[in-house]
Amino acid sequence: MLLQPSAEERLQKVIARSGISSRRQAELFIKQGRVTVNGKTVTVMGTCVDPKRDHIKVNSRHLKPPPPDVFLMVHKPAGYVSTMKDPEGRPTIGNLLDRTSVRTFPVGRLDYDSEGLVLLTNHGAIAQACLHPRFHVEKTYLVKIKGQLSDDAITQLEHGLTLDDGPTAPARVRKVRKVAVNSWIELTIHEGRNHQVKRMLQAVGHHVLKLKRTKFGPLNLGNLSVGNSRHLTDREANALRDLLEAPREPQKTTQPKKKALWAKRTKKRSTRPHETKSGQQNRIKKSHV
């Protein structure tokens, strides 16, 4: 008999996915005793529920069924913050979106003075997969730099650099075009450290003048104009879902360790009678007979 996979999820996750609050606020509701499951107040964090079977109430109101997955692509302009709200009052990605009933959040961030593709979704697992190093989701940037990128600098970028927060993974670099004393390059990485592209190019002696993210995993910015947004197509959304099925990790080649080989050879030599201590002692005894 085949066991059916469990449909239970953490209560705070179910509440947050319904769109009425964030995960942190949902946890606060639970601690304050404002959540009931099947008529009983739940205050234990980490309680699991089945959203399709259990009757969940928050502040005495029935929880709405979870909304459908939402995936949005935004062409962020320079001078915008990659968040929904900003305490300093700067323009945000949220200002570029139409008001919808489904709550979404940006996946990762793009520098304030940079532009390009930003993904927004309400799917936490896919968002985490897009950002976690284990999944190796690539990001491609079109970068205008000061000066001309030398072959030696390209080699350094392709082999990985050592920054103040550690070594970088190898990048892919392609020269695009030359403009007067400056040039455009295309840089692809799968990491997502703070200001990483700018710091990598600074490490090889080039100041970044302009930066635009053109690709994010299976998504391509295409001809989406600056400041506009659109829903992903079914094919694009399914490509993101595929990330959860088969995370890409570099395969490690299994080679015998030198130390193990040396130990094996040493063991073979030590089994020869004339090379062992006991063998030497036997020869000494025979010589005295």
Image (tube, rainbow, N blue to C red):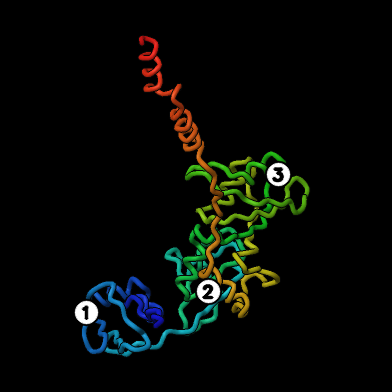
* x and y percentages locating residue 85 in the rendered image: 45, 69
Q: CA distance from mark 2 to mark 1?
A: 35 Å
The part of the image, by quadrant, that contains residue 65 is bottom left
Q: Nearer the viewer, mark 2 or mark 1?
A: 1
Residue beneath the point at 56% across and 75% down: 72
Q: Which residue is mark 1?
A: 33
The amino acid pointed to by label 3 is Leu
Q: Which residue is mark 2?
A: 95
* Disc 3 element: loop
The part of the image, by quadrant, that contains residue 60 is bottom left
Depth check: give the residue in front, 163 or 180.
163
Label pair 3/1, CB-CB below 8 angstroms: no
Mark 3 residue crowding within 10 angstroms, few (<14) / some (14–19) / many (20+): many
* x and y percentages locating residue 249 in the rendered image: 54, 57
Compare marks 2 and 1 and give the one earlier in the sequence.
Answer: 1
Compare marks 3 and 1 and give the one earlier in the sequence.
Answer: 1
Q: Nearer the viewer, mark 2 or mark 3?
A: 3
Q: CA distance from mark 2 to mark 3?
A: 37 Å
